[in-house]
Image (cartoon, helix red, strand yellow):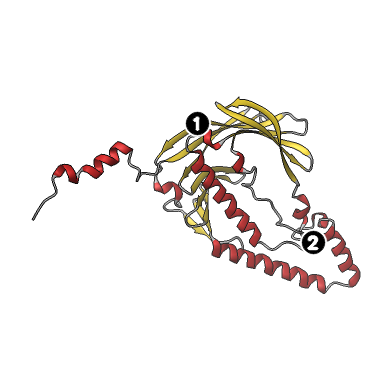
Amino acid sequence: MRRTPAIFAAAPFVLLALLGNPLANPGVVFEITTTDFTSEPETVDLAQVQVEGPNVAMGVTGADGQGRMIFRGDDGEMIVVDDTNQSYMQLDSAMIAGLAGQVSAAMSQVEQMLAQLPPEQRAMVEQMRENGMGGIPGMGGAAAAVPEIDFRQTGRSETKAGFAAEEWEVLEDGALVRRLWVAPWSEIDGGEEARDAMAGMVGFFDDFLAAMPSMPGQDGPLIDNPFRNFDMGNGMPVVTEELGPDGQVEQRSTVTGVERRTLDPATFEPPEGYTRQGLPGG
């Protein structure tokens, strides 16, 4: 039997080493530093956004404690991790359909209740519904709270966080609430990969909100897409400033580090030992 000379058998591995091993798919890690100027003294938090292929993982801090959000683009699902309670919720197409069914059923019950009211009371409730329900729980008051959001480019260009960036302003109901300094993806190491993964995450939540039934008298969803803060096709915000009513900067988030590296696959998995939770009220 003829044997392949060792030098030829090893050639593929030598070639991979010379080319940097294209089979490896290093991700990109963005370090984000956020300074809150409203606290006394000022507080500084560090967070990471980790991207590899179509997957995104980011830490989140809320009133209930620490957690993470994991978007898995290949699977089309979002995992919301609660580190404080060591639990997680997994949102996929089946779960979204179930949640939409629950919301529809609840709205149907409300309509049945309204149909049993005397005409005068029903007319009053319908009028309140058109006006945003005046804060009546469960009757659509949140619809009136969704602001109209506009983005505008100012034409100013400066170097921010080490990147050549352009200034954008965000207005809610005509009031300036946020300032973004946006760098082109081509100027950011791993930027194109991050752009595509984040676009997938935004699309996932668009589909999620589209599956939710609208309240009567409302054209769109009750809430806006929390990830559609900006059209990421324009680039990546490397500095984001949250503004107060007086125009002063209340919070500033800055990209303070970008690193290419292969990530642990566990980054995009529910933590071992955590309990999976179902839908609220499910």
Q: Nearer the viewer, residue 264 or 149?
A: 149
- Residue 257 image label: 1
Residue 263 to residue 273: above or below: above
State the residue lying farthest toward the bottom. Answer: 116
Q: Name the spot of residue 157 as percent of width and height, x first.
A: 65, 27
Q: Name the spot of residue 95 as percent of width and height, x first.
A: 56, 63
Q: Name the spot of residue 31 as percent of width and height, x first.
A: 51, 34
Horizontal placement of 198 versus 150: left or right? left
Tag 2 or tag 1, which sits nearer the N-term?
2
Dot 2, crowdedness within 10 Å: few (<14), some or many (≥20)? few
State the SS at label 2: loop
State the SS at label 1: strand
Instruction: Please name the residue that numbered disc 2 is placed on.
Output: 217
Location of residue 103 by image quarter: bottom right
> Which residue is at a point 72% across and 67% down the rendered structure image?
107
> Which residue is at a point 83% across and 55% down the rendered structure image?
134
- Residue 185 image label: none
Q: How many marks?
A: 2
Q: Does any portion of residue 41 appear in the rendered image?
A: no
